[in-house]
Every structure is written in structure tokens, then in C-alpha cells.
Amino acid sequence: MRSIIVFLFAASFLPLPTRGDESATPPLSEDEQRTALAIEALTRLQNVDLESNPKLKQTVLKLLEKTRGTANYVKLVQQFKIPNQDRGLLAVALRNSTNETGVAALRLLLANNDLGLLEQILRGTNTDQAIQTAELLGSSPDKNTVKLLLPLVEDAKADLRLRRQSVRALAQSIEGASGILDLAKADRVPEDVKFTASTELNRVRWPEIKQQAAKVLPLPAGQNSQPLPPISELLKIKGDVGAGERVFNNLRVGCATCHRVKGQGVEFGPDLSEIGTKLGKDALYEAILDPGAGISFGYEAFQLQLKSGDEAFGLLASETADEIAIKAVGGIVTRYKKSDVARREQMKLSIMPAGLQQNMSTQELVDLVEYLASLKKETTK
């Protein structure tokens, strides 16, 4: 132990390492270089009890604070089994959610078996952070991942985007996929996440789960009631932009009766002139096959039950103290006196009808997505 303390002291006199090609990357500061040397020395120690080595503990804790938020922080926590670092580990995990540092940090956090902090994040008000946490959990298959995410799938109070991401994350492990399958067998997969569950379980790598999923969570039916390939397979098929434009304008499919593109079409649903800039092909497929997956703000459907017994259904065009205006499919706006309305309900389902793919062949669907993906914001030169 004394030798390592001497080394840490002597490190301040050793030649300082650099990042290599200084023309491409700024060189490490002297403080960063000495910290790197100290970390290198400390990680060579084996079976060290910090509580019995106060000086070493002090050195480690100083370095821990100095490296907070970095990969070296994770190394120190792991090497010396430093307790009470959950928040620091989660911060590293979220900051490095797409690389091995983030995964290592999350695994350490899960290994503690204290899920309170992760529960707090997943159930908190910061939805984006919760979704990012769920996504990260999917890259770190663990028994605790199922405990954390499976209840969210059924929780109607949780954000829909979070619940769908929880399904995607669970499908990354056999335990999680089995959990979703069990919910499906018990008819407990909510309608608004059923498409996501079907898509994910029908492409897992475990044959038994895949076979059972095809029965209890079948993929959407295409033309002639034939099952469509999974989105991952649709993405591999080459599409034709010109053919896709013809599909878009075909009355049998009906896209142009609700959407405008570059001034053409009906102004009812969102303008799609730049949709290819906003959504990738995978998201476009999901929007067509599962219209309720992402309802744009301002395009939520409303249903009015009138005292006369009639009904009105469409988008909320405008509202005053005495009147409500509903825009129906086709773009026609009708105004109703509020005194004539018996009940008003905002629908959870999208105004866009489900099952559009049944009016197209698989190739026509691929062509349509190719066309939509080509609709991008024009760049000024």
C-alpha cells in the first residue's frame, strides 16, 4: 500500500501524457494529465479496503469529485465499491446513453438493487429524461429492468411515449419480452401500445417468443388481409418517389383528402410539405400503421354529443364563450352553440383512420413512405 501512495506522489514528477495528435485535439492540461496518471495507478490496486487506509481513501474521494461525470468516475466507483453514488452514476449514464460508459454506469446502479432513484426518474415530471432512462435500461438487460419498466406498460397515467419506449426496451431481453408476452396472453396490453408490442415481439431473436407473439400480437394486416412484414423488413425494400406521389393522391388511399403538400390537397390534418425533415422512414411507417402513435398538438380529435341526438366529430377549429367550431374530414368547419352541446369529449385516438395500409400493396406502402421521406425543407444557397 505504501508503494502506491509513493507512486501517486511521484506521478507529479513523471513526463506528462498527451492526447496524441495535438493538431486535431487540444492537449490535456497538467491537472488532467496528473489525474489520468493517478487513476491509472489506482485501478491497478486489488482488494483494497478504503476504510482501513484513510490516506488512500482521501486521495480516492478527491479524485472521485474531480472526475465526476466522466468514465474515470465510473472506474473509481467500481474499483473501490464506493457507496451512495447513485445520482452521480445516473448522471454519467444519461450523459453517455449511447456508449459503453453510460452502460457501465447504469449496470453499477442496477447492481445496487436500490431502484428508488430510477423509479423516481421514470415516474417523475421530466418525461424526456424518463424516456432516455427507459431507452438506456433497454441497453442494459437486467432483472431489475423488467421490474422497473413492465408496470409502466399498463399504467394509463404514464406518458404514452414513455410506455412505448418501455416496450421497446423490454423487448431487448428475453425476460422483458416474456413479460410483454404474458401481458398479451392475459389481454392486458393496452390498445395504445399494442402496435409497438406487436412490432417489437415479432422481430425478437427468440423463436419461441416470436412464434407465440405472431398468435397473440399479430402484425397489422395489409392488402388482402395478408400480414405486413415488420418495419425493419419494410425499411430494406426500395421505394419509388414518383410512384409514392401517385399513391398519396390516389382517392383509394385518401392521403390528399386530409393533408396538403406544397399548397396542394385539403387543409385538415398537418401540412406534410416538410415531413421528411421531421421524421425518418421508421417513424413514417409507424405514423401510418399506428396513427395514434404521435398525435400532433392541435390535431386532437373531439366528439360532440348534441342535445338533438346528433354527433359531430373532428378537429377543434376555434372556440368562444358561446360557440365551438369543429372542422370535419374534408376541411369543412361547422359551428355549434355550446348551449346545444350535451357532452364534449377529446378522443384518445388519432383523427387519422387506422388500417390505411389495407388499401395498398406492400410495394405501394413502401413507395408512399419513400415519397413522404423526400418531402424536406428547402435549403437556401
Image: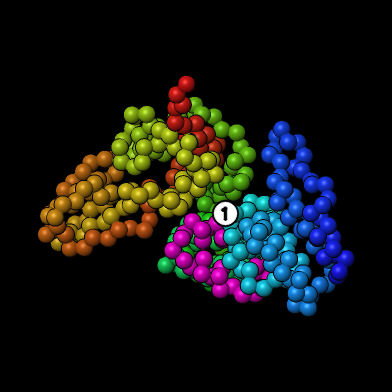
Q: Position of residue 352 (x, y in %)?
A: 38, 47
| SS category of the residue bearing label 1 | helix
Q: Kindly identify the residue that appears in the image at 56 percent across and 61 percent down.
A: 134
Locate residue 53 relative to residue 310 in the image: left or right.
Answer: right
Near-viewer residue (134 or 372): 134
Q: List the residue tagged with mark 1.
A: 199
Q: Position of residue 223 (x, y in %)?
A: 50, 44
Answer yes or no: is residue 213 visible: no
Near-viewer residue (239 or 117): 117
- Which of the 4 image quadrants contains residue 211? bottom right
- Which of the 4 image quadrants contains residue 359? top left
Q: Is residue 290 above or below residue 1?
A: above
Q: Kindly identify the residue that appears in the image at 28 percent across and 55 percent down.
A: 302
Q: How is the image coloured?
A: rainbow
Q: Kindly identify the residue that appears in the image at 52 percent across and 66 percent down.
A: 121
Q: Give the residue at the far top of this rendering.
A: 381
Q: Give the residue at the far bottom of this rendering.
A: 52
Near-viewer residue (163 or 134): 134
Q: Which residues are magenta?
A: 108-134
Locate residue 339 relative to residue 370 in the image: left or right.
Answer: left
Q: Position of residue 251 (x, y in %)?
A: 37, 35
Q: Amino acid at mark 1?
A: Thr
Q: Kindly identify the residue that appears in the image at 52 percent across and 52 percent down.
A: 220
| Residue 127 is inside the magenta segment | yes
Q: Residues within 10 Å of mark 1 (few under 14, many from 20)?
A: many
Locate residue 332 relative to residue 34 in the image: left or right.
Answer: left
| Residue 365 is inside the magenta segment | no
Q: Give the residue at the far right of this rendering.
A: 3
Q: Position of residue 168 (x, y in %)?
A: 58, 57
Answer yes or no: is residue 276 visible: yes
Quadrant of the drawing holding the N terminus: bottom right
